């Protein structure tokens, strides 16, 4: 095979391979090469049990961002949210950890509020609701402590 | 007495062989950084290891993805969670089956040919001829093959993953009637960068194993037709076994 043609097919192979790698890494692996279009908000929860890094943040069921990190901060779980630029969240917003279905994954539901001031980059959502501990609810039900 | 002597001789021979293999690897890599850089040799080897393997890789990937979707559907239906089929196919593809199956296919297709090619050159004294012409045989023959395998394997594995997930889509969505949206969204929510990264790391190390074992076996083949046949068999068996064993250790470390 002549040299030019050989180099062409190898180049084609490498290009297709890199395209596949890029698809896996960026589309499926959510690798962020440029992180420009997001701003961060923090929210403190008494328990973030079940919530994972990368879980989606939703307003009215529409995905508007992701959970960026979860760390312990003075007995509370400090959750950092990366919200898309252009989504407005006010300081009376409520962040709650919800479950998709009964055994589904945990995600963050936001009701953005509206009465207070606009939350800027790095702002803190004060009003939070931790997820329902299903086992506790069931045990309360079984032991008859439901009010 | 002679039994103990026999065991000792075996062990010493094994350790010597392992040492020779490591030295062979280090020498071949050492030659990578010394001129003349034989870039066209690398391109040629990538054509052989990478481009020519695409057909067989696409074929095996398609059927692997399809059978995964079929099997996954069968077991997930028992829990009424067919919606998770996409993540089941994609995770097993990206984390495990893609790297291992693609590496095994490349071993069978390209690895055996590498051993045979280098072995023939050894038997017909072409390697000695190269040395006589002051061309280092390691640099001319082995280093390009190793570099080409290291670059080609991750690309082939990425192709395998994508085609496999596509094959799963064909069977899961078009044949078994799962909704396409839930297939893709379950993939996107389940697959993390960690999974993709682990798969890439695995594929690179498999590329090293394949070229290393197959070139070594060919380079040090016995000077007979029988010896060459034995070297080819040994290289394919040893490379395949090493891939599976190394895969287990790498998975347990990466998990």
Image (cartoon, grey):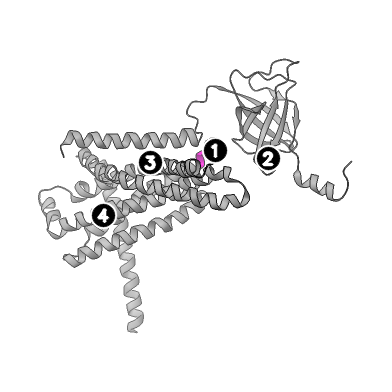
Looking at the image, is mark 3 or mark 1 nearer the viewer? 1
Label 1 environment density (alpha carbons within 10 Å; few <14, some 14–19, many ≥20): some
Q: Is residue A142 found left or right of A45 in the rendered image? A: right
Label 2 environment density (alpha carbons within 10 Å; few <14, some 14–19, many ≥20): few
Most extreme residue toward the bottom is B1
Residue pointed to by mark 4: B215
Q: Chain of mark 4?
A: B
Q: Is residue B247 found left or right of B152 in the rendered image? A: right
Q: Are marks 1 and 2 on the same chain?
A: no
Q: How many callouts does the rendering have?
A: 4
Residue pointed to by mark 1: B179
- Residue B185 visible (yes or no): yes
Q: Chain of mark 2?
A: A
Residue at the spot x=23%, y=33% of the render?
Answer: A8
Looking at the image, is mark 2 or mark 4 nearer the viewer? 2
Disc 2 on helix, strand or loop?
loop
Disc 1 on helix, strand or loop?
loop
Label 4 environment density (alpha carbons within 10 Å; few <14, some 14–19, many ≥20): many
Residue pointed to by mark 2: A101
Q: Chain of mark 3?
A: B
The alpha-carbon separation of the residues under discs 2 and 4 comes to 54 Å
> Of residues A106 and B46, which is closer to you in this image?
A106
Task: Indicate which disc residue B159 carries.
Answer: 3
Q: Position of residue B248 (x, y in %)?
A: 47, 56
């Amino acid at each position: 095979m002549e040299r030019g043609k050989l180099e062409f097919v190898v180049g084609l192979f490498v290009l297709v391979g890199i395209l596949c790698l890029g698809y896996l890494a960026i589309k499926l692996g959510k690798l962020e090469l440029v992180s420009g279009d997001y701003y961060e908000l923090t929210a403190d929860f008494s328990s973030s049990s079940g919530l994972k890094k990368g879980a989606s943040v939703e307003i009215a069921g529409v995905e508007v961002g992701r959970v960026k990190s979860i760390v312990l901060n003075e007995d509370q779980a400090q959750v950092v949210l990366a919200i898309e630029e252009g989504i407005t969240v006010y300081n009376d917003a409520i962040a709650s950890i919800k479950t998709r279905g009964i055994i589904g994954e945990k995600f963050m539901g936001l009701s953005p509020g509206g009465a207070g001031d606009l939350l800027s980059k790095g702002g803190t959502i004060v009003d939070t609701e931790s997820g329902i501990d299903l086992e506790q609810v069931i045990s309360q039900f079984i032991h008859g402590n439901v009010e | 007495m002679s039994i103990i002597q026999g065991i000792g001789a075996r062990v010493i021979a094994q350790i010597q062989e392992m040492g020779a293999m490591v030295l062979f690897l280090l020498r071949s890599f050492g030659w990578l950084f010394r001129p003349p850089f034989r870039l066209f040799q690398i391109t040629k080897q990538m054509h052989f290891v990478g481009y020519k393997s695409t057909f067989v890789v696409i074929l095996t990937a398609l059927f692997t993805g399809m059978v995964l979707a079929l099997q996954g559907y069968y077991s997930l239906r028992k829990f009424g969670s067919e919606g998770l089929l996409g993540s089941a196919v994609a995770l097993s593809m990206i984390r495990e089956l893609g790297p291992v199956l693609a590496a095994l296919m490349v071993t069978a297709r390209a690895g055996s040919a590498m051993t045979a090619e280098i072995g023939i050159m050894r038997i017909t004294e072409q390697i000695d001829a190269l040395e006589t012409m002051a061309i280092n045989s390691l640099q001319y023959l082995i280093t390009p093959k190793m570099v080409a395998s290291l670059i080609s394997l991750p690309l082939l594995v990425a192709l395998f993953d994508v085609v496999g997930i596509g094959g799963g889509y064909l069977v899961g969505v078009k044949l078994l009637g799962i909704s396409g949206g839930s297939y893709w969204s379950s993939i996107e929510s389940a697959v993390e960068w960690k999974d993709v990264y682990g798969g890439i790391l695995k594929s690179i190390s498999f590329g090293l194993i394949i070229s290393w074992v197959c070139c070594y076996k060919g380079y040090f083949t016995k000077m007979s037709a029988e010896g060459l046949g034995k070297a080819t068999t040994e290289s394919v068996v040893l490379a395949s076994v090493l891939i599976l064993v190394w895969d287990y250790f790498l998975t347990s470390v990466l998990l």
